[in-house]
Image (cartoon, coloured by chain):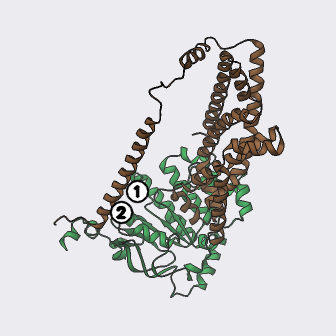
Chain colours: A green, B brown
Amino acid sequence: MSILRDTLERANDGISPAQPLVDGRSLSKSFGSLVALAPLDLAIGAGERVALAGPSGSGKSTLLYILAGLIQPDDGQLFLDSKPVTDLQPGRQLSESVGLIQQQLDLVAQLPVVQNVLAGRLGQWSLWRSLTSLFSARERNSALDALSRLGIADKIDEPTSQLSGGEQQRVAIARLMLQAPKITLADEPVSSLDPARADEILGLLSALATDTGGALIASLHSPDLIQAHFTRVIGLREGVIQFDIPARELTAPVLEALYDLDRDSQN
Amino acid sequence: MIWTGTPRTKGLARLFEARRLLSLILVGAFVWSLTGVGWKDGILHTGGGDAIKDFSLALFPPELSPGFLRLALAASWQTVVHAVAGITLAIIVGVPLGIIASGSLGNPGRTRLAVAVGVRFLLAFMRSIHELVWAVLFVAAFGLSSMAVVLAIAIPYAGILGRIYSELLNDVPEGPLDGLRSAGASPTEVLFYGRMPMVLTDLLSYSFYRFECAIRAAAIMSFVGIRGLGFEIQLSLSDLMFSEVWTLLLFLFGLVLLVDYWSTRVRRSLGS
């Protein structure tokens, strides 16, 4: 871990304090006539753990997918690690900067667990290496190591489809551990988990972000979990930032107002 | 709000009407075709009823003499060999062509699109010509050899398989693919880590189904003079030996059942 920390400190030295890890300027996105994100500014620094809250359709997923480089914003600029995201070569460079855990987990159910975990290395591997690894897993030990830290080392050779939701969550996290991006994104990582497991998974994600000295940005709804695991909370509604406050200042009325169904009809 | 038909619903209504019109035309064509049947003269020609009766009764029992069973077995073997060789070649050719036609290999761009479209045209050409027509061509070229049958089956079947493979590969959920992309996978890695494993069982079961079809195709290659089950059926038919025909048909049926059983076993071993 110390080597990693040294590297990160050196990397951090290179960043001017003016440029945060995630720097989005007037990002906007529409799908047809539906405005998913109104022009929106976002700055997130190294070490921050940011929760995105907001009702469905508020633009949380769209924002996360834009940050992940998976969809292009209609307008605006996005800098990751002080480089314009359009300059990051998809594959290696992008996957070093940013990694995403999707809402539906979206592992390849037909592959064994070990291959889903090793997929985190695809950005680094050559095509030849990744194709041969499908037949005889390369770097199996690093996959085993990640899975052991998550407590499911015994599942390494099972078909991913046989795992429970919570176990698949860990596989997705293990993949991210191998990818080791600076910015970890998670789209509703705990929406399908019971409270105890949700707490555990968020603990793992924030530990991962702390270990790599990067940032964690996750969408979720529970005020307790937000306060326990995050440093900052951003409320989104209809693609507009409603509030951006330290997580400890989040109160129930603030969150209720954000989710209030009747608010629009009163306008 | 006062309801006024929006252009959108008008457009939908028009589409609906057009579809109904098409159905009406098709039903009309069917009814008209019935007038083409010579109802007055009877559908069966003279003695046709007796022929059907003779043929049906010949099933009890079919020809089961050891000599004929040996002949049926040899003919079945010949047909299976042709079908296996044909479908194997079709898969070997169809998989890469299907992958290229799906446009999921290599980086996105004009070249990839152009190559994919070109291969789709090639596949369409291969399958637009029936295996019997290919067989006529190849028998003219190679004579009555197994090579002619194998190629005649392999070419149109590669065209069909390639097309289905490319559709299967394109028709997978995007979620897991996005997951791989965000982990840094290139399009080709997405193909091998995502699309391929996701469609593997469908791909296999469709290939097995096509193998069944290849057995039927190999059997009717008798029309161009190639030996096999169909050839023997033709000989027995022309001798009016209906019980022999039944034996041969049962062998053909048995072959299809065997392939079906094999396919189920393979798919089960893949855990689906």
Chain identifier of the residue bearing label 1 in the image: A
Q: Whole-percent x and y of residue A215? A: 51, 72
The image shows residue A86, relative to residue B122, as above or below, that is: below
Task: Indicate left or right for A238 with B50 as reference.
Answer: left
Q: Amino acid at mark 2?
A: His
Q: Which mark is residue A191?
A: 1
Q: Looking at this view, name the residue that lies furthest to the left.
A: B2
A61 or B217: nearer the viewer: B217
Q: Whole-percent x and y of residue A263? A: 22, 69
Residues beneath discs 1 and 2 located on the same chain: yes
Q: N-terminal of the two: label 1 or label 2?
A: 1
Q: Whole-percent x and y of residue B85? A: 76, 40
Task: Indicate left or right for B163 with A264 as reference.
Answer: right
Residue on which the image places disc 2: A221
Question: Which quadrant holds residue A177?
Answer: bottom right
The image shows residue B154, relative to residue B216, as above or below, that is: below
